[in-house]
Amino acid sequence: VSVYFSPASATLPPNANIRMLMDAKTNRVSFTRAVFRFNPSQVQLVGEVIPGTVLGRAVEVTSAATANSTGQVVVTVGTTPRVTPPTGLFEIAHFTLSAVATSQASTASLDWVTGDMEVVERGQNDLPISATSAQLTLKSITTTEIIIDNGTTGYSESTGDWNNSAYSGYYGTNSRWNACNPPGSTASWQAKA
């Protein structure tokens, strides 16, 4: 069997949606433990890893918080007794990556850890694994910090990682800040006319 990432190469930012794929060829795969590593000082998961549905049951999936700390993702999936094990091409899982802010462009990779992986055929036979890494091009990101006053009625934050600022707001309340990574963080105010 072969495992690979799709796309095989990506440029970040913007965020990249990545699929973990397996080509089982004619083998009926009933269990898969897939493991890959990345450099968490260069890229981070945005949200959780979502296991594919073809095998039917997720046994183990590393949380985004753990993966972003350790730089390793484990996805273990298997069939249930009533599911016919798949053959051919199918998705193991998918996830979204973002680049960590840096002033220098660089490269990174997603690398399979085949020594810690296992693919089992329906007849309980371990199958040999051929793995292809993914290459990432990381563009430089200039970090901008935004500080806003949130003292008025109707203030809300809809996206992004907002934190209390050390600066006092205009109305004597706290102000909020956001490092703009990932880009697109929003805050809004709604006033009654």
Image: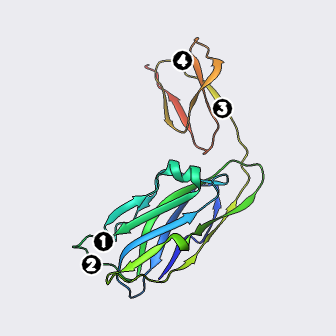
Which mark is drawn over residue 146? 3
* Residue 192 in which image quadrant: top left
Q: Earlier in the sequence, mark 1 or mark 4?
A: 1
The mark closer to the camera, 1 or 4, is 1
In the picture as drawn, the residue positioned furthest to the top comes out as 172
Q: Earlier in the sequence, mark 2 or mark 3?
A: 2
Marks 2 and 1 close (CB-CB < 8 Å): yes
Category of crowding for the residue at label 4, using alpha-carbon neighbours closer than 10 angstroms: few (below 14), some (14–19), many (at least 20): some
The residue singled out by tag 2 in the image is: 84
User: Disc 1 on helix, strand or loop?
Assistant: loop
How many labels sit on residues?
A: 4
Q: Amino acid at mark 3?
A: Ile
Q: Amino acid at mark 2?
A: Thr
| Location of residue 144 in the rendering, given as x and y in whole percent from the top left corner | 70, 38
User: Disc 4 on helix, strand or loop?
Assistant: loop
The residue singled out by tag 4 in the image is: 151
Side of 167 where 104 appears, left or right:
right
The residue singled out by tag 1 in the image is: 79
Is residue 141 shown above or below 144? below
* Residue 88 in which image quadrant: bottom left
The mark closer to the camera, 3 or 1, is 1
Category of crowding for the residue at label 3, using alpha-carbon neighbours closer than 10 angstroms: few (below 14), some (14–19), many (at least 20): few
- Of 24 and 101, which appears nearest the observer? 24
Residue at image position (71%, 41%) is: 143
Is residue 22 shown above or below 167? below
| Location of residue 99 in the rendering, given as x and y in whole percent from the top left corner | 64, 53
Q: Earlier in the sequence, mark 4 or mark 2?
A: 2
